[in-house]
Image (cartoon, rainbow, N blue to C red):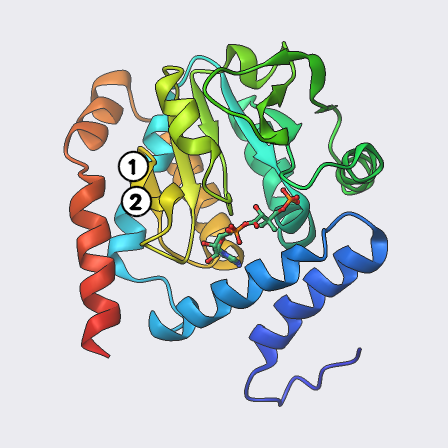
Amino acid sequence: MNIPKSHPRYESLKTRELVVSGIKRGTTSLHGLTAHGRGEAFDYLLGEKTNDFAKKSIEAAAAVLLNAKHPVISVNGNTAALVPKELIILSNLLNASLEVNIFHPSKKREIKIKNHLIKNGAKNVLLPDKKYKIKFLESNRKYVNPDGILKADVVFVPLEDGDRTEALIKNGNKVITIDLNPLSRTSQKATITIVDNIVRAMPLLIKKVKQFEKYNHNELKKIIKDYNNKKILKIALKTIKKL
Ligand code: PTJ
């Protein structure tokens, strides 16, 4: 659909169109539409902008990712549709693997997501392997790649559905998420929650990683130490309530 640039809701409609294209391509699940709608509602309540509290989370996320020994970027049907290029840029900057991990099981869709990322410039994309799984999880998300999430110390799981973050934490991982809903299970359980729209947050995260690349270990450690996720979530909720 051709959306006129003059439309007052241009950015929002363009983003929605990306999810629809993902469904037509076969990379995004139909459930992705509901997930996106929920995100849109929270985005309205947050003023459709990157708030200061989200900027703080982005800084902490960049520091944790740069400090990681084996960071992995988990990709699902919605993130592949919304920010494929940004996911690839981040993976190159951090030397982090991209690993497809979806909630609604479909081998066909996993392969389509991988191909979509390759088409967008990714060199290597890992797929889950049914021989390997993480503990404390029943859903399809438990299957992982032995060279990716299985040996990761930090896992980036934007737009997650909530059953995995807790399991990853119990497995000893640090978890970074992007989620417009500060009340979601993932937001509440993650090590770092970026409460912002993924289409706005990803370019800012890339920028911060580039900036912090020059920082030494102690400087990164200080940023991480000074960060408090619970406090950030409280501020996000207060911002919504104030409207
Ligand atoms: O491809 P699959 O099978 O792995 O499925 C992916 C979805 C996203 C459908 C699946 O993980 C799911 O059902 O997720 P939920 O439970 O709807 O949670 C997704 C979270 O992402 C919700 O809390 C939404 O508010 C949030 N969200 C949706 N769109 C955005 C967003 N957060 C940031 N930016 C968005 N654009």
Q: Amino acid at mark 1?
A: Ala
| Secondary structure of residue under mark 1 | helix
Residue at image point 51% right, 47% down: 159
Residue at image point 26% right, 70% down: 240
| Secondary structure of residue under mark 2 | helix
Q: Amino acid at mark 2?
A: Ser
Q: Are marks 1 and 2 in contact (CB under 8 Å)?
A: yes
Instruction: Residue 6: give x, y in percent of width and height.
Output: 62, 90
Viewer-side residue, 109 vs 55: 109
Quadrant in which the C terminus is drawn: bottom left
Instruction: Residue 213: give x, y in percent of width and height.
Output: 40, 28
Viewer-side residue, 168 vs 198: 168
Q: Is residue 65 visible?
A: no
Q: Is residue 69 above or below residue 227?
A: above
Residue at image point 29% right, 37% down: 60
Q: Is residue 142 above or below residue 56?
A: above
Q: Residues within 10 Å of mark 1 (few under 14, many from 20)?
A: many
Mark 1–mark 2 Cα distance, whole angstroms, equals: 5 Å
Which disc is residue 205 wearing?
none
Instruction: Residue 211: give x, y in percent of width and height.
Output: 38, 37
Q: Is residue 128 visible?
A: yes
Quadrant in which the N terminus is drawn: bottom right
Which disc is residue 57 wearing?
2
Q: Which residue is mark 1?
A: 60
User: Residue 10, located in which quarter of the rendered image?
Assistant: bottom right
Q: Is residue 144 left or right of residue 69?
A: right
Extreme residue toward the front, this view = 138
Q: Is residue 158 above or below residue 180?
A: above
Callout 2: CB less than 8 Å from ligand 1: no
